[in-house]
Image (spheres, helix red, strand yellow):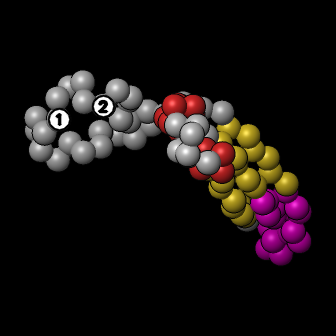
């Protein structure tokens, strides 16, 4: 979800039915996972520290609709997907 709508800088710039899709909400499949490693504990408290690496692979309704409607030279399969990679540290 994105607060507000896109391209709404000027009131009345676009007719209410100009966009056939929602301009602030996307739905779609998401696949992700995380692997967590224990790091040496914090010396002062003895609390264990954790370091995680994660990924999220997903798409959304607008990407899928664009792909299905433009299969003849439109979007490639790789353009359907978004990939997020990250590191999380708990201290």
* Mark 1 element type: loop
Quadrant for residue 40, please give it.
bottom right
Magenta stretch containing residue 19, yes or no? no
Neighbour tally class for label 2: few under 14, some 14-19, many 20 plus, Cα within 10 Å: few
- Residue 14: give its label: 1
Is residue 26 or residue 63 the one in the foreground?
A: 63
* Location of residue 19 by image quarter: top left
Give the class, few, some or many, for how many residues have Cα within 10 Å of label 1's Cα (few <14, many ≥20).
Answer: few
The quarter of the image holding the C terminus is bottom right
Residue, x 79% and y 63% (percent of image)? 51
Q: Give me the residue at 53% from left, 44% from top.
A: 74
Q: Would you say residue 49 is visible in this rendering?
A: yes
Q: Image quadrant for the N terminus?
A: top left
- Circle 2 SS class: loop
The quarter of the picture where residue 36 lies is bottom right
Residue 70 lies, in percent from the top left, at 52, 37
72 w.r.t. 17: above or below: below
Q: Earlier in the sequence, mark 1 or mark 2?
A: 1
CB contact under 8 Å: marks 1 and 2: yes
Residue at position x 70%, y 48% in the image: 56
> Mark on residue 6?
none
Horizontal side of 36 relative to 54 (left or right) equals right
> Which residue does the numbered mark 2 point to in the structure image?
19
Q: Which residues are magenta?
A: 36-53
Task: Name the spot of residue 58 as percent of width and height, x first.
Answer: 65, 42
Q: Residue at x 69, y 61 (%)?
A: 86
Q: Position of residue 30 (x, y in %)?
A: 68, 38
Q: How far apart in space, not on screen, are marks 1 and 2 (Cα)?
A: 8 Å
């Amino acid at each position: 979800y994105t607060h507000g709508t896109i391209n709404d800088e000027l009131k009345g710039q676009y007719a209410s039915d100009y966009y056939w899709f929602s301009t602030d909400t996307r739905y779609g499949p998401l696949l992700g996972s995380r692997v967590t490693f224990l790091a040496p504990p914090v010396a002062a408290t003895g609390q264990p520290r954790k370091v995680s690496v994660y990924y999220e692979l997903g798409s959304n309704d607008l990407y899928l609709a664009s792909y299905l409607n433009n299969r003849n030279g439109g979007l490639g399969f790789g353009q359907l997907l978004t990939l997020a990679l990250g590191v999380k540290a708990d201290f």
